[in-house]
Each structure stands twice: as C-alpha cells, then as structure tokens.
Amino acid sequence: MTEATPVERSAVIIEDDPEIADLVAVVLTQAGFHTHVATDGVLGLELIHQHQPMLTTLDVNLPGIDGFEVVRRIRDFSSTYVIMLSARRDEIDTLTGLNSGADDYLAKPFRPRELRARVEAMIRRRNLERPATPPPPPEAPEPGEDWLHHNGLRMHPEMRLVELHGRPVELTRTEFDLLSAVMQRSRRVITKDELAAFTRNDVNSYVVEADRRSIESHIANLRRKLSDSVTHPRFIETVRGVGYRLAKSQS
C-alpha cells in the first residue's frame, strides 16, 4: 500500500460505538482536525496507513483484535500520537496500554473538555518540538557535549538521545520528557503534579488523579526499559506520597 503524505491536523478515530465515535469526532473537529472513523482495528490500521494522522484515538474493546494489539501494530509503522479510550479503569489496564505504545490513556466515560484539553496539550508539545526553520543535517554530538550522565545512563535533551552503557534506549516522547525532567532536577524532588503539567507544557494545567496514575504508569514503563529496580534504584527514586527524584550516584 502506498502511504499518503501526512495531512496536518488529520485524526483517525477507532471506535465501534457510534455515539462515542460521533462525540470524539465533534471534539476533534472543534480542535481543527479532519477526522476519519473506523469501527474495528483492521480498518483503523488501514486508515492510519492511508492518512498518516497526527492523532489517533483508540478504543480498547474492539471487535476482532483489541486495542492493545492495534497500538502494538501501529507502532510498527507510525508515530501518530495515540490516546486510548477505555471503560477499564484498573491501573494494570492503563499500564498495559502505555506499555503497548499509547501516549495517553483516558477512562470512559470522559468529559469532552478533558479530551479536548489532552488534545490541545499534545498540539502544544508538537509545536514546541517542531523547529521554526528546517534544521541542518544532524551531527553526532561531541563526547561530553550537552550530555546528562548518571550511573551509566546518559541523555542528550536536544538531540533526544538516550544511551545505557553505550547502547541506545528507545523511549516514547512522554517517557523521554519524564526522564529529562528527573535528570535535570537531580536530587531535588519533582512531584507527580509537576510532571503531569510538564508533559503538557502547561504549568497552569489542572491535574486530576487520573493524570497522576498516568505518570505512575509512564514511570513504571520507563523503569522497565532501563531495567531499574524500584527497591534499589539506579536512576529514578520514588519519594512516597510526593513524586520522584534522581537516585544517588554510584561509584
């Protein structure tokens, strides 16, 4: 299949409930998106191939292949920003969705304003990541230049590179941003609310409990990719009831 050139503000909605699909379409249309609706995962994958959308909303409970498998297949060929929508509220389901490759997870029933706020946060992040003028061809950074180092882990915030003992680590945008925030804060504690606002690029954003659980799930996934222990951390230390900080340096 020949892939189309990406269309700015294009969105794919994968949802088998027509009322919810219509509601999501209204929210995204008001946010300036041109929407395409699929009622199952197979058709949704075809639409993503065809339209290369900026954003995809994805129901978990779909006929045929479920949403977790759909997002895994999406990540084989697309970097579209995926918001999973699900009636499942358990932490394990949120973690499964994020582990599968979703960028955000929103429980049903959701308020249209909450979905709109998350979409607008995604757009702000995208605009900040996009340079105003085309950048020159990337050059490998010089050793020690603008790298953050800690216990065998190093990251370059501007190049968006992460290496663990010299090997590259593949992180999602949110995972990278969270790791960058913790490393730059060093041993000073950064709260879950601050991290939630940071990932939205909006220090004044209203943070609810679902946002805090989402941060916990992203941090858990980040730890898994870094093979970091919760009880004896090398990189991210939990400050119970508050947030996180960089673990102590190990000689």
Image (tube, rainbow, N blue to C red):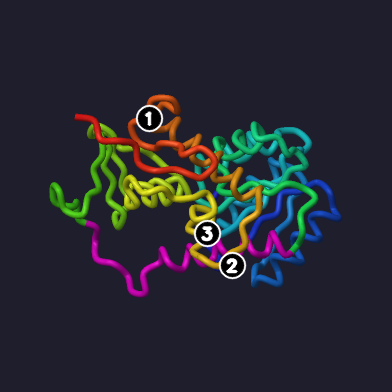
Q: Is residue 218 left or right of residue 59?
A: left
Q: Amino acid under label 2?
A: Arg
The residue singled out by tag 3 in the image is 197
Residue 2, x across and y down, in percent: 53, 52
Residue shown at the point (55%, 61%) measured from the top left? 122
Residue toward you, 235 or 75: 235
Relative vertical location of residue 163 with respect to residue 130 in this rendering, above or below:
above
Q: Amino acid under label 3?
A: Ala
- In the picture as drawn, the residue positioned furthest to the left comes out as 143
Q: Earlier in the sequence, mark 1 or mark 2?
A: 2
Residue toward you, 147 or 247: 247
Q: Secondary structure at mark 1?
A: loop
Residue 233, label in figure: 1
Q: Secondary structure at mark 3?
A: helix
Gap between marks 1 and 2, in whole Å?
40 Å
Gap between marks 3 and 1, in whole Å?
24 Å
Magenta range is: 113-138
Bin the neighbour count of mark 3 within 10 Å (Cα to Cα): few under 14, some 14-19, many 20 and up.
some
Q: Earlier in the sequence, mark 3 or mark 1?
A: 3
Residue toward you, 82 or 162: 162
Q: Are marks 2 and 3 in contact (CB under 8 Å)?
A: no
Residue 181, x across and y down, in percent: 39, 52
Does the magenta segment cover residue 131?
A: yes
- In the picture as drawn, the residue positioned furthest to the right comes out as 19
Relative vertical location of residue 122 with respect to residue 232 in this rendering, above or below:
below
